[in-house]
Amino acid sequence: MRILVLHSCVDATARPDELDTLAVADAVCDALRQNGHSVTRAAFVPEQLDAKLGDCDLVFNLVESVDGQDELCAMIPALLEKRGVPFTGASAAAIQITSDKPASKRILRAVGISTPDWYEGPNWVGLDGSRRYIVKSATADASLGLDDSAVVIGSGVGARAEVCRRRFGGRWFAEAFVDGREFNIALIEDQSAVKVLPLAEMRFVDWDDRRPRIVGYGAKWHTEDPAFRATERHFGCENLEPELSASLHMIANRCWEIFGLSGYGRIDLRLDSCGEPYVLELNCNPCLSPEAGFAAAAHQAGFDYCQLIDNIVRAAIP
Ligand SMILES: Nc1ncnc2c1ncn2[C@@H]1O[C@H](COP(=O)(O)OP(=O)(O)O)[C@@H](O)[C@H]1O
Ligand SMILES: [Mg+2]
């Protein structure tokens, strides 16, 4: 097939999480060529889209933000749907809803899937002055704005949200801090059925206990941050804890269905101190870096990187 790999438009001065899209595009292009496709790549610029589409058979959609705004990503599948060009990953509707964390949480609540309590400004009604919260972006991902100071008690929420709004723009909300184990659940469409890949637990090893246990921006993107090495991915939950594994599979499959995910996706979830699972967020088109969690989970399931990319392409063919 003739495949156009479309990625975010970023320049050399962009943040590490934004630059990552270029490295991922390189890896995906290599894999597609190894799989026998004819590949072109382009940064997404709205007015150039039609020219870039040319006579391609399919778009591999790696666009994570438009003009630095993650929530505008739904524009890409929307434009491709309108033109009838097949593309990988999630639909415009699924991206639209999941790229707004409070909006997804309202749906999770409505269907009875547990998600931590949350509070929104400007009045922050309901916050408990002595309880711990994490202040996070409603629409950005990649742990943007999540450092140790993101975890505050109720009386500090308003000030923290304002600091983040000034620095990064956008809406910020507070979510009850869930101080327990963390899991990333990768899902992939395989021969028209969704398959949950091996569950990855993010463990905090030799952790500096003065710091909140979060996979923050430093842990994801700054190799010199001690948290980068102190957050380790572990597999094996299916054999060691079959009941927990079954319950996480059920939650992940329901999320896939309810939010209308397609191609591939990832659910981030935490257990509270009693072991109850709470969904933190849903990721359409999660990062496909060969070093990142999705490829690691696929590898555990026996897919090498080229097979993973091939699966994603096959799922996109109408
Ligand atoms: N309610 C929460 N309680 C505890 N930790 C959280 C909570 N929400 C987020 N975190 C931490 O912050 C990380 C990033 O948050 P997440 O909601 O997954 O946003 P994103 O990955 O899109 O930036 C999580 O992986 C987790 O370590
Ligand atoms: Mg996440």
Image (cartoon, rainbow, N blue to C red):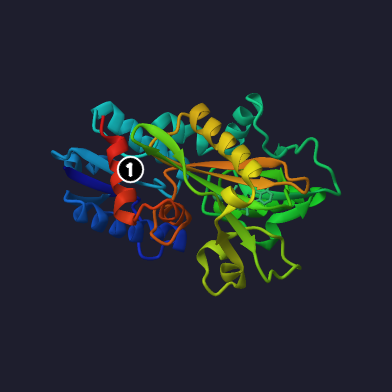
Position of residue 89 in the picture relative to residue 80 (left or right): right
Give the camera-side residue of 34 and 190: 190
Q: Amino acid at mark 1?
A: Ile
Which part of the image, by quadrant, shows the C terminus? top left
**Residue placed under numbered mark 1 in the picture:** 312
Q: Image height check: is 109 above or below 89?
A: above
Residue 158 falls left or right of residue 98: right
Where residue 229 sits in the image (x, y, percent)?
57, 70
Residue extending farthest to the top is 110
Q: Quadrant of the N terminus?
A: top left
Question: From this viewpoint, is residue 7 visible?
Answer: no
Q: Residue at x 42, y 62 (%)?
A: 291
Q: Residue at x 84, y 43 (%)?
A: 128
Q: What element does badge 1 sit on?
A: helix
Q: Residues within 10 Å of mark 1 (few under 14, many from 20)?
A: many
Residue at 52%, 71% in the rendered image: 223
Give the tally of numbered discs.
1
Q: Position of residue 207 (x, y in %)?
A: 69, 69
In this rendering, the answer to whether 159 lies above or below 96 is: below
Can you give x and y, in whole percent of width and height, for residue 23 in the image? 34, 61
